[in-house]
Image: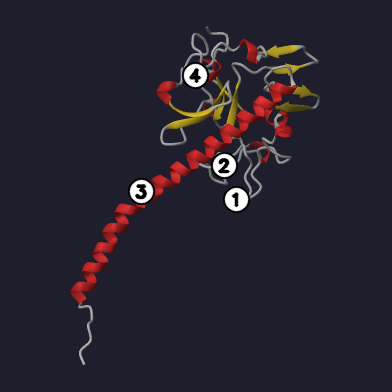
């Protein structure tokens, strides 16, 4: 009795078809994974937005300071938001690949570590938030109240950086404090009304004044 078998030519044709389909599908899968990481980062931003909102509700509508100097330590905004579910005692440090902080962008690798084993994925607007040193009575810049924001949905609070602060280009060109386009040439961010969004570099002003993105007093 005869048996149906693949000839060598037929087998090679099948292998060629599989190779072509793989070449077509793999880039699509990579793009899909990147989009999924972008969505996860936006979710991180939304959670931070909720944290900022709850902090304001407990503090007469004031946003948290960028930093509070309590000798010999500086308490960052990251620590001030911990009671509102925006982190834990590990702060923004990566413990393992299976346990990432809310403050860690999913697009970054585990080896993205800087000083003191701390992981900084998101930065708070240093144009808006103040650094407070009671010993020197220094305030830089002015602390802001949500009631003074004329366009809260357009005002930047926090987004993708490699530093706990975020600056426009006219405040310094340090690469670590600039907003970064990690997600298909876009930056994940949370705005003054606590909504999260993605923006391309062309939608981010380079000046700290004269626009509603960096300046909360702009009408």
Residue contact at pointers 1 and 4, CB within 8 angstroms = no
Residue 180 appears in the figure? no
- What residue is pinned by disc 2? 112
Q: Which residue is mark 3?
A: 28
Question: Residue at point 53% right, 24% down?
Answer: 174
Quadrant assignment, res 15 = bottom left
Quarter that holds the N terminus = bottom left
Marks 3,2: beta carbons within 8 A: no
The residue nearer to you, when weighing 136 against 130, is 130
| Residue at (51, 18) in percent of width and height | 154
The residue that mark 4 highlights is: 169
> How far is mark 3 from mark 2, CA to CA?
26 Å
- The residue sitting at 57% across, 46% down in the picture is 110
Q: CA distance from mark 1 to mark 4?
A: 33 Å
Q: Are marks 2 and 4 in contact (CB under 8 Å)?
A: no
Among the two numbered marks 4 and 3 on one chain, the one whose residue lies closer to the N terminus: 3
Q: Is disc 4 surrounded by few (<14), some (14 to 19) or many (20+) residues within 10 Å?
A: some
Would you place residue 32 above or below residue 79 in this image? below
Q: What residue did someone put label 1 on?
A: 97
Q: At which x and y percent is residue 33? A: 44, 47
Q: Nearer the viewer, mark 1 or mark 3?
A: 3
Which badge, 1 or 3, comes first in the chain's sequence? 3
In the foreground, 118 or 152: 152
Left or right: where 61 falls relative to 46: right
Tell me how far mark 1 sits from mark 2, CA to CA: 12 Å
Q: How many marks?
A: 4
Determine whether the residue tagged by mark 2 lies in a helix, strand or loop: loop
As drawn, which residue projects farthest toward the bottom?
A: 1
Q: Position of residue 12 (x, y in %)?
A: 22, 70
Position of 206 relative to 196 (above/below): above
- In the displayed structure, 159 sits above or below 108; it is above
């Amino acid at each position: 009795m005869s048996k149906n078998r693949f000839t060598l030519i037929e087998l090679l044709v099948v292998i060629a078809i599989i190779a072509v389909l793989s070449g077509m599908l793999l880039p699509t899968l990579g793009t899909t994974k990147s989009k999924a990481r972008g969505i996860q980062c936006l979710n991180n931003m939304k959670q931070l937005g909720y944290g900022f909102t709850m902090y304001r509700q407990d503090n007469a509508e004031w946003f948290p300071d960028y930093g509070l100097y309590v000798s010999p330590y500086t308490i960052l905004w990251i620590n001030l938001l911990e009671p509102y579910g925006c982190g834990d005692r590990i702060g923004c440090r990566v413990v393992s690949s299976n346990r990432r902080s809310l403050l860690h962008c999913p697009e970054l690798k585990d080896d993205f570590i800087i000083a003191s084993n701390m992981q900084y994925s998101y930065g708070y607007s240093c144009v808006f938030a103040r650094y407070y040193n009671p010993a020197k009575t220094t305030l830089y810049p002015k602390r802001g109240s949500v009631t003074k924001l004329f366009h809260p949905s357009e005002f930047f609070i926090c987004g993708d950086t490699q530093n706990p602060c975020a600056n426009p280009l006219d405040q310094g060109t340090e690469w670590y404090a600039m907003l970064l386009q990690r997600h298909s040439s876009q930056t994940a961010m949370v705005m003054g009304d606590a909504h999260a969004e993605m923006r391309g570099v062309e939608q981010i002003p380079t000046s700290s004044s004269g626009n509603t993105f960096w300046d909360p007093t702009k009408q």
